[in-house]
Amino acid sequence: MGILSRFKDIMASNINALLEKSEDPEKAVDAFMRQAHIDLGQVKAETASVLADERRAKRTLDECMDEIAKLQRYAEKAVEAGSDADARKFLEKKAPLVEKSARLQVSYDLAAANAASMKQMKDKLESDISGLEQRRLQLKTRMAAAKAQQKVNEAGSPVKGRNDSVFDKLEDQVNSAYYEAMAIAELRGEKKEDIDELFAEFEKQTGTSTKAEEERAVIKENKKPNE
């Protein structure tokens, strides 16, 4: 009978019970959703046929009941007209129709039950899917957050470590450049100081020599007349 053979299983399906038994809730929800969509597709595909069976059974039953009712009226009129023979004929034709109507009633009841079951399954599956869409979204969000936190825990806050490493490296580079600049400045300062000292010493020496030479020349000039 197609999807109707799974009526009890579908109506008894419970995602909460399934999640309690599952080690991976996310996969369990996805699997349940896939099956629910498959079942709903089958329900929709077979519903038209089941409803057609119900309408056909109802029409056949109604036609039989109408025929029974008509023969009953004819029999009653025949009796009223004093024609017992005709009345008997109408009643004889009515008897097999009454038996037939009982069988048709059973067929119609079954078709109506099938149609009702299809509607119940359709409502149940649509309700499950609607609820699970929101449930799955919430579950996926929580699982993603949990996995992200696990990575942070396992890595020992790798983001902080990377930032610290970068800043340490930059600090080392800045310090190195600073120390190099200071060293160059000190060397230049020492060279300037040495040159100044040497020049001052040179001027001192030069100045002394020049004065001595001048004094020597004066003495020499003064001694010339006496000679």
Image (cartoon, grey):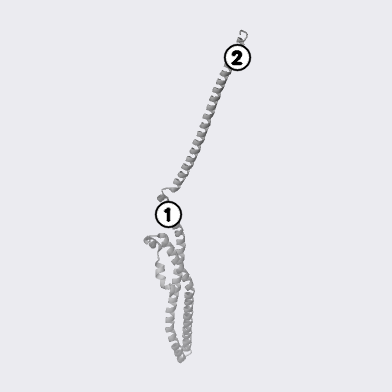
Residue 4: image x %, image y %? 43, 73
Q: Which residue is mark 2?
A: 217
Q: Which numbered circle lies on residue 55?
A: none
Q: Residue at x 42, y 79 (%)?
A: 106
Residue 57, percent from left and from top: 47, 79
Please determine whether, in this image, residue 42 is positioned above or below residue 142: below
Say which quadrant the N terminus sits in.
bottom left
Q: Residue at x 61, y 12 (%)?
A: 221
Q: What is the quadrant of the C terminus in the image?
A: top right
Residue 122, can we see it?
no
Q: Which is nearer the eye, 171 or 2?
A: 171
How far apart in space, not on screen, are marks 1 and 2 (Cα)?
A: 103 Å
- Of the two numbered discs 1 and 2 on the same chain, state the one appearing first in sequence: 1
Secondary structure under the numbered disc 1 in the rendered image: helix
Instruction: Name the residue that disc number 1 marks.
Output: 147
Indicate the amino acid at tag 2: Ala
Q: Is residue 207 above or below residue 151?
A: above
**Going 43% across and 83% down the picture, which residue do you hit?**
100
Name which quarter of the figure residue 89 lies in.
Answer: bottom left
Q: Residue at x 44, y 48 (%)?
A: 158
Q: Is residue 32 left or right of residue 220?
A: left
